[in-house]
Image: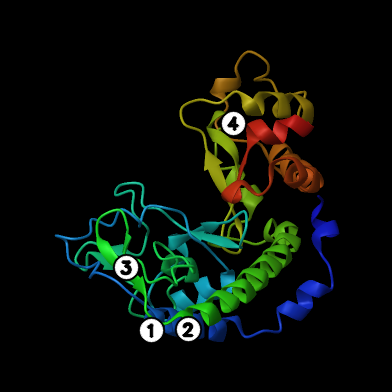
Amino acid sequence: MKVDELYRGENQDILKVDVLEIIRNYNKLMEEGITGPNCTDPSICHADCCSIFIDIPKILAKEIISQGLGTEKDFIRGDVFSFQIRIDDKTGKCAFFDKKLNGCKLYSTDLKPPQCWIYPTNFDNFENKNIKCKRADGWKIISPEKVIKAEALLQVYSNWSQAEFVIELKKIKHRLKFKFNEKSLKERLQELKPYEFAGFKDSWNYFKILRAEGFSLQMKKYCKNFNPRCPLLPNNYFDCNNICEVVANNIIIFFRSILDLYLEKFSPNNGDYPLIKISDFF
């Protein structure tokens, strides 16, 4: 489905809800509605549950940043909600996992992402059965009434976040124009050798560059098409010191022109737009 077709008036209605208040109320209800072992005790928990991508809306990410609990680098573009919390490549843990705490830096705040509360009790353990997670047992729902209310708030949160995601998709072409560190996307492209360029990455308010791992031949066909008189083509492609202005300008124009088709076929792909997939439309 094309971005323009996703945009509907009902998205505006749900976005009138104060979703941060919804999150805070939800967190309070879940905190009072369930009980379980102390996850910050390293003899009990090894943070096995802190290794999955958690989808969150941009407004929650912005609030986390504004309170000094995180930075823009802690979030990547999402496919369901506007963002996902980044998983640290070195530790394999959520960006908000703190080794000293043996737990989440957001846990004791009212900005804990709602999905993080659900496992392992879910919303249906009203028989008060003893539930075991990956490391320990003793999880119980102690207030079914509060958990039922929380479940309803979670649905509002989900609807709100999906509506915001559609709005963020609507803005995607505008982010192609934004500068980062006073440099346009075209200027940043021109700093690369053709074989270093692997695609685009949708970031916070602007697009970044995906760099190739090793040497890429993907740009060769674009260079031939956009600058057929280049003296380095076809045999001396690897001798080129930088993507020329005409090629940089035209590949951005081309990417912008096929964005709707790309999203229809591949989805936002966590903000990564590799050249090998873009080439499907070239």
**Mark 2 residue element:** helix
Whether label 2 touches label 3, CB < 8 Å: no
- Mark number displayed over residue 146: 2
Query: Are the residues at dot 1 and dot 2 in contact (C-beta closer than 8 Å)?
Result: yes
Specify the amino acid type for callout 2: Lys
Q: Residues within 10 Å of mark 3 (few under 14, many from 20)?
A: many
Q: Nearer the viewer, mark 4 or mark 3?
A: 3
Camera-nearest label, 1 or 4: 1
Who's the residue at 14% across and 60% down the image? 43
Residue 125 point in image, percent of width and height: 44, 68
- Disc 1 marks a residue whose amino acid type is Glu
> Seen in the image, is 165 located left or right of residue 27?
right
Q: CA distance from mark 1 to mark 2?
A: 7 Å
Residue 156 quadrant: bottom right
Label 3 sits on residue? 139
Residue 253 visible at all: no
Q: In the rendered image, which quarter contains the C terminus?
A: top right
Q: State which tag comes first along the sequence, 1 or 2.
A: 1
Residue that mark 4 sits on:
194
Instruction: Tell me what residue is drawn at x 50 percent, y 25 percent.
Output: 215
Tell which residue pokes out farthest to the top in this image: 235
- Mark 1 or mark 3: which is in front? 3
Q: Which element is circle 4 on? A: helix
